[in-house]
Image (tube, rainbow, N blue to C red):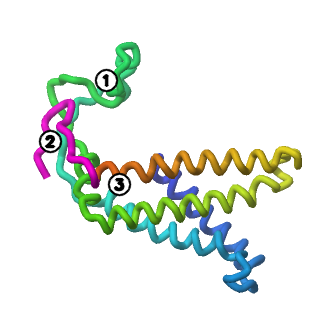
């Protein structure tokens, strides 16, 4: 059900953005810079479509996993381990999609790595442009003397998020897949 909410939010964002662009900025030229958000947004929409077909609807191998009783392993917090969504042993393991393996399969191709890195850069530019436009909006009620700082904090947060997203294709392309903690992975 979370995926439906994310889809609804994305469709709403795209619909409002296209309507506002049509009403406000459609008469400007591309060189004016008024269409930068629209162009980067359409580029991101293409990227999200490709990303969904590769990772959400892509063909994966099943991976046996033991789910915890309430689907979250709270006991692992006290042992300082990060296996929140599985337990070590169970009677009947459940087959789940092996997204970890799929990342290594997709990002073995340098072209897909470069495409994803380019898309993260476009996402960062889009986010910075949108943030720069949103902060001075009167509805946020950010005092004028703090707006410059708020914009720069948004830029730093965007750069941090972008580095995290870029680390996935870079890591999976440069380093081999490690063996799983639960059961060994079949080599690529």
Q: Nearer the viewer, mark 2 or mark 1?
A: 2
Q: CA distance from mark 3 to mark 1?
A: 33 Å
Of the two numbered discs 3 and 1 on the same chain, state the one appearing first in sequence: 1
Determine the secondary structure under disc 2.
Answer: loop
Q: Is residue 27 above or below residue 89?
A: below
Of labels 2 and 1, earlier in sequence is: 1
Question: Which residue is identified by label 1?
Answer: 69
**Dot 1, crowdedness within 10 Å: few (<14), some or many (≥20)?**
few
Nearest the eye: 50 or 73: 50
Q: Residue at coordinates 35% horizontally, 53% vertically from top-left? A: 170
181 is within the stretch colored magenta: yes
Where residue 102 appears, as percent x and y from the top left, is 25, 53
The chief SS type of the magenta part is loop
Kindly give the residue lying farthest to the front in the view shown.
174
Q: In the rendered structure, which segment of residues is drawn in magenta?
A: 173-188
Label 3 Cα neighbours within 10 Å, binned few <14 / some 14-19 / many ≥20: many
Q: Which residue is mark 2?
A: 185
Give residue 185's quadrant in the image: top left
Is the C-beta separation of discs 3 and 2 under 8 Å? Answer: no
| Mark 3 or 2, nearer chain start | 3
């Amino acid at each position: 059900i979370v995926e439906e909410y994310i889809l609804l939010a994305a469709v709403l964002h795209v619909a409002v953005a296209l309507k506002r662009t049509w009403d406000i900025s459609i008469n400007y030229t591309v060189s004016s810079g008024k269409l930068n958000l629209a162009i980067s947004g359409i580029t991101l929409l293409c990227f999200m479509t490709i990303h969904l077909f590769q990772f959400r609807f892509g063909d994966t191998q099943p991976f046996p996993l033991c789910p915890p009783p309430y689907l979250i392993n709270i006991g692992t917090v006290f042992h300082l381990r990060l296996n929140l969504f599985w337990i070590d042993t169970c009677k009947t393991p459940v087959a789940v999609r092996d997204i970890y393996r799929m990342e290594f399969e997709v990002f073995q191709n340098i072209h897909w790595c470069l495409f994803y890195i380019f898309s993260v850069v476009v996402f960062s530019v889009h986010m910075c442009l949108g943030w720069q436009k949103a902060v001075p909006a009167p509805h946020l009620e950010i005092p004028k003397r703090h707006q410059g700082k708020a914009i720069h904090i948004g830029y730093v947060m965007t750069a941090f998020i972008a580095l995290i997203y870029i680390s996935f294709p870079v890591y999976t392309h440069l380093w081999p897949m490690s063996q799983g903690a639960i059961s060994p992975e079949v080599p690529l």
